[in-house]
Image (cartoon, rainbow, N blue to C red):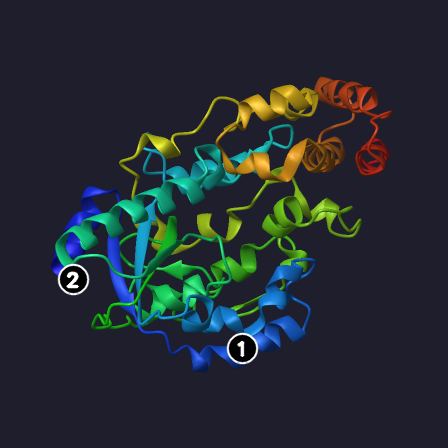
Amino acid sequence: MLASIRQWARELGFAHVGVAGVDLASAEAGLMQWLAAGFHGSMDYMAAHGLKRARPAELVPGTVSVITARMDYLPRSEAPDWPQRERERLARPAEGVVSLYARGRDYHKVVRARLQKLQDRIAAQLGPFGHRVFSDSAPVLEGELAARSGLGWRGKHTLVLTREAGSMFFLGELFVDLALPPTPAVEPHCGSCTACIDACPTGAIVAPGRVDARRCISYLTIEHDGAIDEALRPLMGNHVYGCDDCQTVCPWNKYAQRSELPDFDARDGLGGAALVELLAWTEEEFLRRTEGGPIRRIGHERWLRNVATAMGNAIAALPADDPRVSALRAVLQARAGHPSAMVREHVRWALQR
C-alpha cells in the first residue's frame, strides 16, 4: 500500500512520503523543557496545547498512524548557486530580504490541498477512513514525526535535513485511523559541523537542536506582534520577513531540490526589492501584493515595523555620503506620523541610527 501512496504523492508534487506511529512519549520531556525555558516567546498557543503536540491520538481521536510528506519549495528558476546568491543579498543593506519560502504562494494552502487529494486517492482504493490533514497549522510535532518516519534527521538548527534535498522543503501530515507499518528513521549526518550555529546573526541556536525563538529572526519578523527588542534590531540586518541564514550555509543544501510547482515561484517585489519601495507600500498595496501568500498574515503594521528596522540597519551600514542614505531617511520621515505607535517607534529608532 505504501508504494501506491508514494506514487500518488509524487503525482501530487510531494517528493517523499513516510509513516510514523503515534507514540511520541520520548519527545515530551524535551518539549516541556523548551516551554519551561520560555523559548517559545509570545507564541502562547505553544504552551496552551502543551503535551497534545506530542500525542497525535489526543489531538485527533482514533489516529493510529501518521503519513508524513515532504514538498520541495525552491523556485523552478533558482540557479544551482542559490545559497551564495542568497548570502550576497545580506551584503546589500538597502535591499529587503524575504525568506525564500515566502516569495510565492502560501504553502499552508498548497500542502493541505494536495494532502487532501492524496487522502481522496487512498479512500478510493480502501474505502472511507478517518483522517485529518495538517501543514504547520495545528499543535503537531512536525519535525519529530518527519524524523521518525525517515523523511530526514533533525539538524542542529532543529529543521529536518536529508542528504537528497537539504532542508528546503515543507512538511505535511495526514493523521489516519489506518494501521500502517512505520517507515524507518535515518541516521543523522551533521557530524561536527556547526555552520548553522555559527551563522545565526542573533545567536538563537543556543545549543545543537535547541532554538530560543525569542532571538530568532523568523520569529521576530513573523510571530512576534509587538516592538522588537532594541538589542536585537541591529543584528537583524536587512531581513524583513523570515530568515534563511542557517540554511544557506548548510552543506547539505547544495542538494536542495527545485519545486515542480509554479505556486512557489517568486512574486514581483519579493525578491531583491529596495527597502525604500517596501516601506512605501500602502496597506492596499501590501494586501494586493501579498494576496494568497504567507506574508499577508503579519499585516501591514508589522510589515512596516520590519522594513523600518532594516532601513535603520541600512543607514548604519552605508557610508554617510551614499545617496541611498538620504533616500532611506526621506521615506522614513514620511512614515514618522503613522497612526501605529509601534511603527512610529521603529521609524524613530531607524532615523537615529
What's the distance in space between the residues labelled 1 and 2, CA to CA? 31 Å
Pick the front one: 3 or 352: 3
Considering the image in quadrants, where does the N terminus appear? bottom left
- What residue do we see at 50% from left, 47% from top? 244
Q: Position of residue 101 (x, y in %)?
A: 45, 41
Q: Report the disc number at residue 289.
A: none
Give the percent coordinates (x, y) of residue 228.
Answer: 75, 47
Look at 48% across and 21% down and name the residue there.
268
Residue 204 in view here: no
Give the residue at mark 1.
30
Q: Give left or right: position of 252 versus 141.
A: left
Q: Nearer the viewer, mark 1 or mark 2?
A: 2
Q: Quadrant of the C terminus?
A: top right
Q: What amino acid is labelled 1 in the image?
A: Gly
Residue appearing at x 33%, y 71% in the figure: 148
Within-10-Å neighbours for mark 1: few <14, some 14–19, many 20+: few
35 or 307, which is in the foreground?
35
Left or right: residue 258 versus residue 295 is left
Measuring 65% from the left and 55% from the top, which residue is drawn there?
A: 202
Residue 55 appearing in the image: yes
Side (left or right) of 98 relative to 100: right
Q: Secondary structure at mark 1?
A: helix
In the image, is residue 44 above or below residue 93? below
Percent of width and height locating residue 88: 51, 36
Q: How many marks?
A: 2
Say whether disc 1 or disc 2 marks the residue closer to the N-terminus: 2
**In front of the other: 20 or 317:** 20
Q: Residue flagged by tag 2: what amino acid is it?
A: Leu
- Eyeballing the image, is 353 above or below 174? above
Q: Position of residue 185 (x, y in %)?
A: 28, 72
* Residue position marked by numbered label 2 in the rendering: 2
